[in-house]
Each structure stands twice: as structure tokens, then as C-alpha cells.
Amino acid sequence: MMKFLLSFTLLFSLFSCRPEELKVLKVSHCENFNSSGKCTQASSIKKQYRITIAADKEVKTWLELANYMYFHSRQTPGLIIRFNRKFTLTEMQSLKRSLRIYYDFAGSRGKVEGVEVGENWIGIFQYLGAMLREKIRQEERENDRIKLEKIFPVSLKFIYTSEMFQGERETDINVVLEKVEDR
């Protein structure tokens, strides 16, 4: 009889246990993160990017700058969203179905391309060059000469939503161009 009660109690407790409510614990600005969710290049709420361009390289138009940033200097503003516990299987399925992450780059909106879901975290990033290219395309300024002050400093907002949580985080970004001689 004792064995039966012990088995019943154990079985009952297994099926009646529910994890604590899932909550966003912390949202951090992060440029790069690894596959275990560790931020390898932290960022801040105000970020200045110094884009170095070889003196012999011509970058005169907004499109040339956006492509250079995307293919060569590769700035990746992003976030890591940490939760109070590991996701359950049901929550992982819900995330796959409902997670949507967007950016607003000075009024130019788009879907975030870089999204990774870990066991208790979500990492997101978007290439700054891609956001700049989309903004100038929408404004039909691809072939205009670069005047940084026409766009930068700029406000970048990440908006994230799912069936279980939602939020947004904003950062201010500035860009400085610097010509350098080959060494």
C-alpha cells in the first residue's frame, strides 16, 4: 500500500506541476551573440559607428555607402531578450508560430532578418547597411550624394511581439565616415 501511495503521489505531482509564468527578465543591446545566447559584443542605448573606408575606395552615394556597410563593415544593432526560465515545448511551438520582430529606422519599417531562439533567450539583429538601403530606396535617394546629417543621428526601434509577450526597445545611432590610407 505504501508503494502505491508513493507512486500515486509522485505521478500526481508530475502532472500537477506547472512552471512559473514566463516573463521577460532583461533586454540588453547586443551587436553579436553566440549560439548559447552569450553577448560577445555589447552595445549601448546610444551608439556611434565609425565606418573606415580606404582612401582609394570611392563611396559617394547613399547606395554605395549602404552596400559598403552591409558587405564590408557589417554593423549589426540588436538585442538579447532573456526570460526568467527555459521555454516549455508548448511555448517553443507558440514562438515558432507567433513571434514577429520588426524595426523602425527613422520611419522606415521592416522585418528583422536575424532571429535566434535559445532555451531561455531570443537574440535579434539587423544589418545597419540593409536598413539604410531600405530607407533610401523608399525615399528614392539611392543616387544622392552622401550627407550624413540628412539621416544621422537616427532613432532605431525594435518591436517584438508573440502570443506570450510583447515589447519594444529603442536606440540612437550615429555614423561617422573616416577615410584611411592603406598600411
Image (spheres, rainbow, N blue to C red):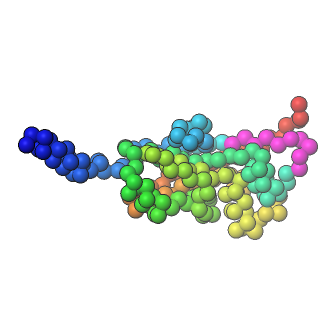
51 magenta-colored: yes
Q: Nearer the viewer, residue 175 or 76?
A: 76
Tell me the quarter of the image containing the N terminus: top left
Residue 4 visible in the shown view? yes
Identify the image quadrant of residue 53. Answer: top right
Q: In the image, is residue 113 above or below residue 137? A: above
Q: In the image, is residue 136 above or below residue 174? A: below
Q: In the image, is residue 103 above or below residue 78? A: below
Residue 106 position, x and y percent, is: 62, 59
Judged left or right of residue 169, residue 63 is right
Judged left or right of residue 76, residue 143 is right
Judged left or right of residue 7, residue 110 is right
- Which region shows up in magenta? 49-58
At x 47%, y 64%, the residue is 97
Tell me the quarter of the image containing the C terminus: top right
At x 40%, y 62%, the residue is 163
146 magenta-colored: no
At x 59%, y 58%, the residue is 112
At x 48%, y 55%, the residue is 168
Residue 176 position, x and y percent, is: 73, 44
